[in-house]
Image (cartoon, rainbow, N blue to C red):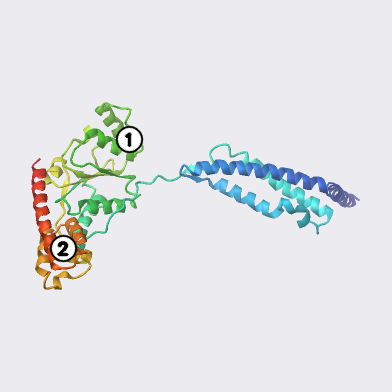
Amino acid sequence: MEMLGLVVGSIISSMAEYCDYHRGTDEHVKNLKRRWEVLESRKEDLESRLEAELRRGKKQKKEVELWLGEVHKIKDEINIEQVPARWKFLSRMRMGECASKKTKVVEDLLIQASNFTDSLVVDLPESIGEMIPASTLVGESTTQRTMEEIRVCLLDDNDVRKIGVYGMGGIGKTTVMKQIHNLLLKETEIFDKVIWVTVSKEFDLIKLQSDIASKLNIDLSKFDDVITRATKLNAELEYTKRYVLILDDMWEAFALEEVGIPEPTPANGCKLVLTTRNLSVCVGMSCKSIKMELLSKEEARKLFLDKLGHDVFNAPNLKAIAEEVLEKCAQLPLAIVTTAASFKCLTDDFEWRDALEELRTSVKGFNNKEQQANKS
């Protein structure tokens, strides 16, 4: 009898549920539509917030991504605009039951949405630096040899903390260091930041401080006192921890502490690289000096022909002129590239002779300026 009572009770309960779904089918469907409209409004509000935050360079939280996916999924399942048409083959009892279950899913999603009171995004991992456009290296053996020496000092030699790359103007120091800079951006296990700043001939302490600060996203403009600025910059660089600071085109040595640059040590994991025309700057900054060598004559000739686009040395009327043109370039990559570009469109030996005469004059003037610059 007890077992019979349980069976009868179960049947009565099922019948009651059946009757509830049957009688309340319309109400269940209407309730589903109402709650879906609330959920859709919540989704639109959330997507507006999300769009604004993503524009600031953030990344969408995984839980938000999953929630939006579930909302799209339930939308496809119920297709609220076509509920009667999609469910017309269901019995009224099954229609009411289905609407009730979908409403429960919608309610659960609304509860989850109420938990998104904080940010919908997270910060992206901070980049250690920005890629710098760099021209192709020229002089395979000579340039690659120098580049490899710099790379080893930066990545493999823990004792070398300051590196000075020196050589004549136009020899390719900046080009090599741009390549090194971009290579370092991949070394995220070794460095936290790679900073590039161009110093130039007229040394300006305030400008150098500001240029370094801008790469660290800090503003020193409200501080007029050089010492205060140096203190703020020093604190930020120490907070940055392991960084490489590349100072391009330096013309004179200076004390790092005056600028606010911490002394690179094995303990802080930092390194300093500078480029300069003068060995004395490397010595004054206590750097390991690396000399940028001229291209070999073979490399210079190959580069000249590559940029010129045709073998002028096989033209009897131009060979002697071309040899002198190449000689005037002094095996300097920049001079070769620039000169070859200007001679490329010349068609006969008269034009080549005129251009050579202009080149002689400009080289003489350049040499005089170089001598004056190196004396100053």
Horizontal placement of 35 versus 146: left or right? Answer: right
Q: Nearer the viewer, residue 36 or 109?
A: 36
- At label 1, the amino acid type is Glu
How far across and down, in percent of the image, does residue 278 sit?
A: 13, 46
**From the image, which quarter does the C terminus lie in?**
top left
Q: Residues within 10 Å of mark 1 (few under 14, many from 20)?
A: some
Label 2: few (<14), some (14–19) or many (≥20) C-alpha neighbours in 10 Å:
many
- Vertical side of 46 occupied by 95: above or below: below
Q: Position of residue 159 (x, y in %)?
A: 21, 47
Residue wearing tag 1: 236
Residue pictured at 11% horizontal, 63% vertical? 353
The secondary structure type at the circle numbered 1 is helix
Closer to the eye: label 2 or 1: 2
At horizontal 26% and vertical 59% (from top left) the residue drawn is 136
Q: Nearer the viewer, residue 301 or 287?
A: 301
The location of residue 2, given as percent across then percent down, is: 89, 49
Most distant residue in the front direction = 350
Task: Give how far apart the Cα atoms at labels 2 and 1 are.
Answer: 44 Å
Q: Is residue 161 visible?
A: no
Q: Residue most toward the top? A: 225
The residue under label 2 is 300
Inspect the image, locate mark 2, and give the three-letter code of the amino acid beneath it: Ala
